[in-house]
Every structure is written in C-alpha cells, then in structure tokens.
Image (cartoon, helix red, strand yellow):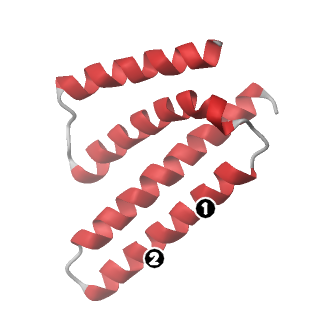
Amino acid sequence: MHPLVTLALLLVSALLESGGDALVRLGMQASAAWTRASLLIAGGLVLFAYGCLVNAAPWDFGRLLGVYVVFFFLVAQAIAWLAFGHTPPRAVWLGGAFIVLGGAIVAVN
C-alpha cells in the first residue's frame, strides 16, 4: 500500500475513533432521551466503522500503531477543544510531544 494512502487511512481511523467516542460522550451527557439515544447509536456506528476500517486494511497494524497513536492524540485533542471546550494543559502538550517523537521513531524504523 502506498505510504500516503496508509497515512490517510490512519488519519481517518483516528477521526472515526475519536469522533465516535465524542458522540458517545455527548450522548451520555444529553438530557433528552431522543438526543441521548441518537448520539449513542451514532457513536456506536462510527466506532463500528472505525473497527471495520482498521481491520480491513492490509497492513501490519502493530508496526503502524506508533504513527496511529500520533494521529489519535492530535485528533483527540482537537475534538476535546472544539466539542467540549477543553484546552489541554502544558503537561498534556509535553506528553504529546513525546508521543509525536515516538511515532516518528517508529515510522523511520
């Protein structure tokens, strides 16, 4: 598989996993029963799509996990900020820098 296609699939996977989790979280916080149920179902479907995408791609996911974790961290922080108004503290960004460094090491190897 072409490296750019692999990176795109990893990014989409991170978007689906983080987005599905955010939908479930919003559903658990919703007060109206219809909204709660809709968000929980949508979150479950998005997480199911994530699982299908990750497991259908012909890759050594164990080897690419380091790169995936970088995407997951960045997407999760963006969603936390945009959807929930959570600005990550400096300690999270410091830890994230180590995640990015680790992903770069795994990618180069």
Residue 99 placement, left or right of 105 = left
Image height check: is 109 above or below 48?
Answer: above
- Binning the other alpha carbons within 10 Å of mark 2 as few (below 14), some (14 to 19) or many (20 upward) gives some
Element type where label 1 sits in the image: helix
The span from disc 1 to disc 2 (Cα, nearest Å) is 12 Å
User: Residue 93 falls in which quadrant of the image?
Assistant: top left
- Do callouts 1 and 2 mark residues in contact (Cβ within 8 Å)? no
User: Residue 41 falls in which quadrant of the image?
Assistant: bottom left
The residue identified by callout 1 is 49
Name the residue: 54% across, 16% down: 104
Image height check: is 96 above or below 88?
Answer: above
Element type where label 2 sits in the image: helix
* Residue 61: percent from left, percent from top: 66, 38
* Residue 70: percent from left, percent from top: 47, 29
Q: In the image, what residue type sits under mark 2? A: Ile
Image height check: is 1 above or below 44?
Answer: above
Residue 47 placement, left or right of 57 = left
- Binning the other alpha carbons within 10 Å of mark 1 as few (below 14), some (14 to 19) or many (20 upward) gives some
Residue sticking out furthest to the right: 1
Residue sticking out furthest to the bottom: 33
The residue identified by callout 2 is 41
Which circle's residue, 1 or 2, is located before the other in the chain? 2
- State the quadrant of the N terminus: top right
Image height check: is 87 above or below 97?
Answer: below
Name the residue: 40% across, 35% down: 73
Residue 73 placement, left or right of 13 = left
* Residue 29: percent from left, percent from top: 22, 70
Residue 49 placement, left or right of 74 = right
Q: In the image, what residue type sits under mark 1? A: Ala
Name the residue: 20% across, 47% down: 85
- State the quadrant of the C terminus: top right
Name the residue: 57% across, 65% down: 48
